[in-house]
Image: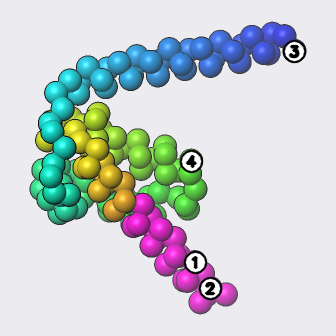
Amino acid sequence: MKEKYEATSDIFRECAEEENVVWKTKCSIATKYPPEPTEVPSWEALMLIEPRLAFLAYEVCSSIIPDRNLLSWYTQVKRQFLRLVGFGAEKEELRTGVAYDVVYDYLSKLYDQRLELEEARNAIQS
């Protein structure tokens, strides 16, 4: 039992070290932060700056991402848009909390709407 615990703690230690390296890398990429905008940008304006957001919205609406649960949200959706908006964004003009909030709200609403549509379709079929 002790060996199993030690092996597990080694795995957690390795993951924590790897996560720390990833975090330091992300932080070093995003060294310049623009001032927060005075007006909230629209989803469309953010897509013009970062076209990959449109593909991410498509993935959220399609069946590429499985049913709604926190694990799929964090591992598939949020992980992808963290590189695109917010303080870890690749493009300087998207390194704001406001851009992050707009994208998070938009994608989570799409995700919820997709779930509601699937539930309605299942109710009709049964």
Q: Mark 3 or 4 closer to N-term?
A: 3
Q: Badges 4 and 1: C-beta atoms under 8 Å apart? A: no
Q: Which residues are magenta?
A: 107-126
Q: Mark 2 or 4 closer to N-term?
A: 4
Which kind of residue does numbered mark 2 sit on?
Answer: Ala
- Indicate the secondary structure of the residue bearing disc 1: helix
User: Of 101 and 110, which appears nearest the observer?
Assistant: 101
| Rendering quarter of residue 35 | top left
Q: Badges 1 and 2: C-beta atoms under 8 Å apart? A: yes
Q: Which residue is mark 3?
A: 1
Q: Residue at x 39, y 67 (%)?
A: 110
As measured in the structure, the alpha-carbon distance from the residue carrying label 1 to the one carrying label 3 is 44 Å
Q: Residue at x 57, y 78 (%)?
A: 119
Residue 95 lies, in percent from the top left, at 22, 38
Q: Badges 2 and 3: C-beta atoms under 8 Å apart? A: no
In the image, farthest residue toward the right:
1
Q: Residue 119's mark?
A: 1
Neighbour class for label 3 at 10 Å: few (<14), some, many (≥20)?
few
Which kind of residue does numbered mark 3 sit on?
Answer: Met
Q: Which residue is mark 2?
A: 123
Q: Badges 1 and 3: C-beta atoms under 8 Å apart? A: no
* Residue 12 as seen in the image, left or right of residue 110: right
Q: Mark 4 or 1 closer to N-term?
A: 4
Q: Residue at x 67, y 87 (%)?
A: 126
As measured in the structure, the alpha-carbon distance from the residue carrying label 2 to the one carrying label 4 is 25 Å
User: Of 39 and 86, which appears nearest the observer?
Assistant: 39
Neighbour class for label 4 at 10 Å: few (<14), some, many (≥20)?
few
As measured in the structure, the alpha-carbon distance from the residue carrying label 2 to the one carrying label 3 is 48 Å
